[in-house]
Image (spheres, rainbow, N blue to C red):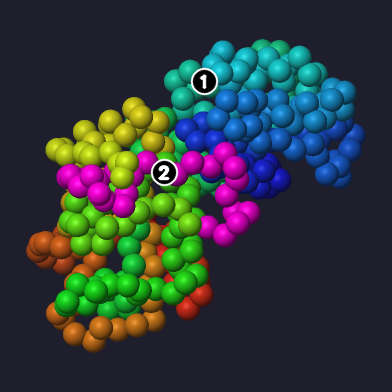
Amino acid sequence: MGQALSAAAKVRRRVSPRPWVGAVVIPAGQPDHAGFEGATDGRTGSHAEVVALNAAGDAAKGSTLYVTLEPCSHHGLTPPCADAVINAGVARVVIALADPDPKVAGQGIERLRAAGIDVEVGCRADDVARQLAAYLHHRSTGRPFVVLKLASTLDGRTAAPDGTSQWITGDEARLDAHRLRADSDAILVGAGTVRSDNPSLTVRLPDGERGVDDTEPIRVVLGAATAEAALQPCLEVSGDLGTILDDLGRRGVLQLMIEGGATVARAFHQAGLVDRYVLYVAPAFFGGDDALGLFSGPGAPTIGQLWRGRIVDVARVGDDLRLEIEA
């Protein structure tokens, strides 16, 4: 399953809004075999199971198939993967997670078991759930998985009193933030950020980190942007934030990255619409109370109303720290 996870990670930026799935076929009687590997083939090609089965050929008969997500059981862009597994003569299937998509939702597992295949579900489920968090959230709620990206000094400040903010973090942290952009289907900023910073919101990564099939995330502005704005063409939205998320979900946005500014960050935070906070912290202090904070506007009025989450990951990125926080 670890190999299947690695295979899936390699294709994420080239397959969304399809799920990034990995699969490995281990031939019968060969537990030490390196395995025939497969992953979701682009936005219209074969699913991971079929890629792995094709690579295995006759060795698939009597084999064990490891796959990160339940094989589908319906006709979509491709025929049902469950049928391909059955027809290949696979003896055992190890699945990390059932697929919450209503078109699948356990039906693939049932079809495999009805065909006499030994099916195990739950292998490394937590790891796969984290890898597929955006897809699982979208299929369960119809909305994008919302990632709020923030950068601050150690004393929680994001800009100087005169408004200058470039650059708080170092080169490595900024490159890591571009990887986060590349993993997202859309990036949202407020109209104020467009006016003050005029960001392009493009993904800038070293050669080789992005494949030829990768596309730029949709640029979304909460409010209006001028025709000359660097992020044009963009999608301009307004109104209820939940309704905006519903619309983005219908557009196939699995992960939405929010980059600011402080007013937009507070709006999504206060509405309880952030699924993961990614905070880059620089080893720096403004050293006073007049610099700008992470959020703009009133916060919790009492300690009893303090928002509390849990830190799910901590990593050093150059001289900075990257913290991931979830509710």
Q: Which residue has dot 2 on it?
A: 217
> Circle 1 sits in a helix, a strand or a loop, which is it?
loop
The residue that appears at 27% across and 58% down in the rendered structure is 198
| Residue 6 percent coordinates (x, y) | 66, 47
In the orientation shown, which residue stands out farthest toward the bottom? 287
The answer to whether residue 301 of the structure is visible from this angle is yes
Residue 56 vs 214, above or below: the answer is: above
Determine which quarter of the picture holds residue 87.
top right
Callout 2, which amino acid? Pro
First in sequence: mark 1 or mark 2?
Answer: 1
Rendered residue at 53%/42% (across/down)? 214
Q: Measured along the vertical axis of the image, is residue 318 above or below residue 75? A: below
Label 2 secondary element? loop
Q: Which mark is residue 104?
A: 1
Toward the right, the furthest residue is 29
Q: Is residue 307 above or below residue 220?
A: below
Assess whether residue 207 is covered by the magenta stretch.
yes
- Residue 202: image location, x then y, percent: 41, 52
Tell me which corner region of the image, top left, top right, bottom left or bottom right, holds residue 95: top right
Mark carried by residue 113: none
Q: Is residue 186 left or right of residue 294?
A: right
* Residue 96 visible, this orientation: no
Q: Which residues are magenta?
A: 205-231
Q: Position of residue 322 (x, y in %)?
A: 44, 67
Which of discs 1 and 2 lies nearer the camera? The answer is 2
**Quick check: is 80 in the magenta stretch?**
no
Secondary structure predominantly adopted by residues drawn in magenta: loop
